[in-house]
Amino acid sequence: MFQLDRRSFVRALTLTGLVSSAEASSLVTSAEANSKSVTASPQGDALPAKGVTRSLARYVVSARTEDLPESVRKEATRTMLNWVGCAVGGSRHETVDNAIGALAPFSGPAQASVLGRGERMDVLHAALMNGISSHVFDFDDTHLKTVIHPAGPVASAILALSEYRPVSGRDFLNALVLGIETECRIGNAVYPTHYDMGWHITGTAGVFGAAAATGRLLGLSEQQMLWAFGLAATQPVGLKVMFGTMTKPFHPGRAAQSGFTAALLASHDYTSSEEVLEASNGWANVLSRDPDYSEITEGLGETYEVLLNAYKPFACGIVIHPAIDGCIQLRNEHELTADQIEGIELQVHPLVLQLTGKKTPQTGLEGKFSVYHAAAAAIIDGAGGVQQFSDESVRNPVTVSLRDRVTTVVDPDIHEDQARITITLKDGGRRLEKFIEHAIGSVENPMTDADLEAKFIGLADGVLPSGQVRQLLDLCWNIETLPSASLIAEGAIGA
């Protein structure tokens, strides 16, 4: 039908005498929109994408806490513990100092805590700050299927809410799961093209997770949750060009704040589109190519994305982790020092250089996106923690010298959590090799509860007194039984 010139088609309809010119134009516009709002069936036929946003909204408002499997509740608890440690650990970074210095004069009532600090801000600003601090070290959780950092947008929003109105630990954990389910399923539907287009998916998808989780705790109806999703969709945040700057951790913080805002507006019947995910001009079609809506709707309440969550042993972009893992293993096995090494060759997945190809980082934040620096620091220090990605480490002459001897080879057959490390020594060109099948911290090679505790303590020590750190750790492990989730925020108050 639309091979016919639009003007001629409208004129033909009008000449029938059955419709006015305005009505004919409206019919064509509607038909054009409907022809674009489609998804592909497994057989390749074009089918209308209908009810995607509503199906998700219905699930979020109706999912029962008692139906969560034990494995899901345990992984959500691990996710929360990891997030609290990261938020407390990053709370004194200059990025957070600068953000609070800029916005505190405009904050409203002191309603919620900034973890690890003494300041209190209104709930929306507290959500922003905790999202920033939890991501500033790039040490937080990662949903490896989409490289979303799930907890930042969601936990930052609902912990702030829990300080404003009563939320039991049990309800908090359910909301956390629902928020993660929402953002990761939406991310699944548009990855990788959304990410390839330059969007930072943690911010753009995370806003839906924050809206879902806060909306659930606010008691939104299905209709209101639809509006919350529409309001969230119109606030995408995050560009990959910001990686290596203070603006990257702003993304999950703003996603938390914006999703929270969306839920609050919806709770007062502030309307928006009811098919914002699947519409021809909706979020998925505008911000990606060829979205797969089945990733959003299939298996709701049967499979859980939080079970695919992973936790970082190293404080940098996750695609670097296999290289760090391999370098540390070779260093320890052969007692290597930098002066013994002629060169280091890294065979890596193509995404590694797309995201972390900075050869000469000048700051710690830039170092988190340099596979060259990461490999050098791993050999020199045998670690990949916060200190290895500080300004001091990035500018260390010994590290710089070894970094200049690191080369990379892209191998499309190597998976994102794999790497092959070849170290050539100066003693006659002897070569040492290590292939990392699954990096430590991946779903296949996960961090244990003990590993997460050690990470938590390492991040929180020096920010909070040691006794308070232990108490906070216990609160996190027992979140499901807490009468109020706000006890975690209270336990993380710093000087």
Image (cartoon, grey):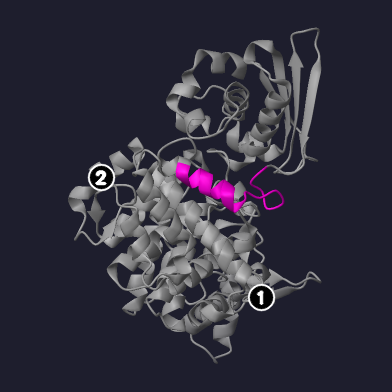
Q: Earlier in the sequence, mark 2 or mark 1?
A: 1
* Residue 302 disc label: 1
Q: Residues within 10 Å of mark 2 (few under 14, many from 20)?
A: few
Location of mark 2 (residue):
495
Q: Nearer the viewer, residue 277 or 25?
A: 277
User: Residue 248, can we see it?
Assistant: no
- Relative to 436, is 201 above or below? below
Image coordinates of residue 270 in percent, x first then y, are 34, 76
Q: Residues within 10 Å of mark 1 (few under 14, many from 20)?
A: few
Give the structural element (helix, strand or loop) at label 2. Answer: loop
- Magenta stretch: give its range: 440-457
- Residue at the spot 31% in from the left edge and 56% down from the top edge: 126
**CA gap, disc 2 and disc 1:** 44 Å
Give the structural element (helix, strand or loop) at label 1. Answer: loop
Image coordinates of residue 233 in percent, x first then y, are 46, 64
- Relative to 60, is 388 above or below? above
**As drawn, is 368 to the left or to the right of 433?**
left
Residues under numbered marks 2 and 1 in contact, where contact means CB atoms less than 8 Å apart? no
